[in-house]
């Protein structure tokens, strides 16, 4: 059982927890009418968002200094909908990261400033479930806040959702998304082609590149494909050489070694994009 230690506003209280000592509880209307020492339970108990980490608590306290409590309440609902949709508890940092991001994004939108997202399509292709959730819930936010959040912003929301679901650092996810976009540009320049962003092979390529980066980071390497490697070297030398060029770039950026098998699978994806004349 938790008891109120301090009410910060109608949506946020500090409570005493039997295991974590002091925690921040976030929930719409959670602090309304609450008094110090009062137990926190009842029908709202399942809607608590608990910030247990001390550094997260401090960041959230700083957030309360400039974000009004109505917006905090709406973001609580937003995150609750996300957790319900994905059937899991998300990393608690989303309460700080996404709230802070959207607060300033909506402020810029209301001031008439545009939002540019050069990696929107790569984000949608890499994280389709998160993107679908961001798109649907953005419509809910638009009605709540009486704004029109542009599509580019949906891409940024998607990255926050993916970060909270996978417990991966947002800066790292952003870096990987930019790396994939850069690799696609190198592919186009090397093969002297313009890739159709609506083509199914482009979708497969982007998802493969993201998967390859994750495998490299987690050292979840695929099995060697020596026989297939020899065939591809002979049949598709341009694509095979390009795959190695791309792997060298990934290796430099990620500061990790990459197994030969990755070149095999990447060559297969590149070959689908390439025109027949290139490898003759």
Image: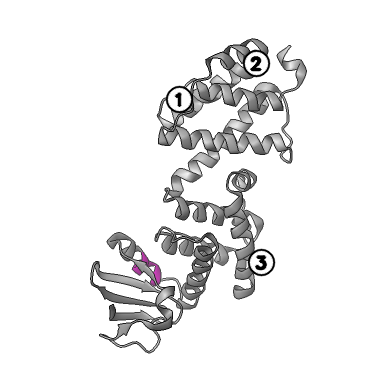
Name the image quarter holding residue 264.
top right
Tag count: 3
Residues under labels 3 and 2: Cα distance?
Answer: 46 Å
Q: Does residue 63 show up magenta in the picture? A: yes
Work out whether mark 3 precedes mark 2 in sequence or the reverse, and give the earlier one. Answer: 3
* Residue 267 vertical placement versus 153 (above, below): above
- Disc 2 marks which residue? 238
Which residue is drawn at the image coordinates 51% and 22% (left, top)? 261
* Residue 71 vertical placement versus 156 (above, below): below
Indicate the position of residue 237 as horizontal and vertical percent values.
64, 13
Name the image quarter holding residue 89.
bottom left
Which residue is drawn at the image coordinates 45% and 43% (left, top)? 172
Residues under labels 1 and 2: Cα distance?
Answer: 20 Å
Helix, strand or loop: magenta stretch: helix
- Disc 3 marks which residue? 148
Q: Which residues are magenta?
A: 60-65
Mark nearest the camera among 1 and 2 is 1
Mark nearest the camera among 1 and 3 is 1
Indicate the position of residue 28 as horizontal and vertical percent values.
46, 78
For mark 2, give the secondary structure.
helix
Dot 2: few (<14), some (14–19), or many (≥20) neighbours within 10 Å?
A: many
Work out whether mark 1 precedes mark 2 in sequence or the reverse, and give the earlier one. Answer: 2
């Amino acid at each position: 059982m938790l008891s109120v230690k301090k009410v910060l506003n109608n949506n946020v209280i500090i409570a005493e927890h039997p295991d974590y000592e002091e925690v921040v509880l976030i929930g719409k209307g959670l602090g309304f009418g609450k008094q110090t020492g009062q137990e926190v339970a009842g029908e709202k108990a399942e809607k608590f968002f608990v910030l247990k980490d001390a550094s997260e608590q401090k960041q959230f306290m700083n957030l309360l200094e400039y974000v009004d409590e109505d917006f905090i309440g709406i973001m609580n609902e937003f995150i609750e909908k996300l957790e319900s949709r994905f059937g899991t508890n998300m990393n608690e940092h989303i309460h700080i990261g996404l709230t802070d991001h959207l607060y300033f994004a909506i402020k810029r939108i209301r001031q008439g400033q545009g939002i540019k997202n050069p990696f929107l399509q790569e984000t949608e292709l890499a994280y389709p479930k998160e993107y679908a959730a961001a798109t649907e819930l953005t419509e809910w936010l638009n009605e709540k806040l009486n704004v029109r959040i542009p599509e580019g912003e949906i891409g940024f929301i998607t990255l926050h959702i993916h970060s909270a679901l996978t417990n991966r650092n947002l800066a790292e996810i952003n870096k990987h998304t930019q790396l994939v976009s850069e690799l696609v540009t190198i592919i186009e320049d090397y093969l002297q082609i313009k890739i159709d962003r609506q083509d199914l092979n482009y979708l497969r390529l982007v998802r493969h590149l993201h998967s390859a980066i994750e495998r490299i980071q987690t050292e979840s390497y695929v099995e060697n494909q020596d026989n297939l490697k020899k065939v591809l070297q002979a049949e598709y030398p341009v694509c095979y050489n390009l795959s190695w060029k791309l792997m060298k770039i990934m290796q430099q950026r990620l500061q990790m070694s990459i197994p030969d098998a990755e070149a095999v699978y990447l060559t297969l994806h590149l070959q689908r994009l390439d025109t027949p004349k290139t490898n003759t």
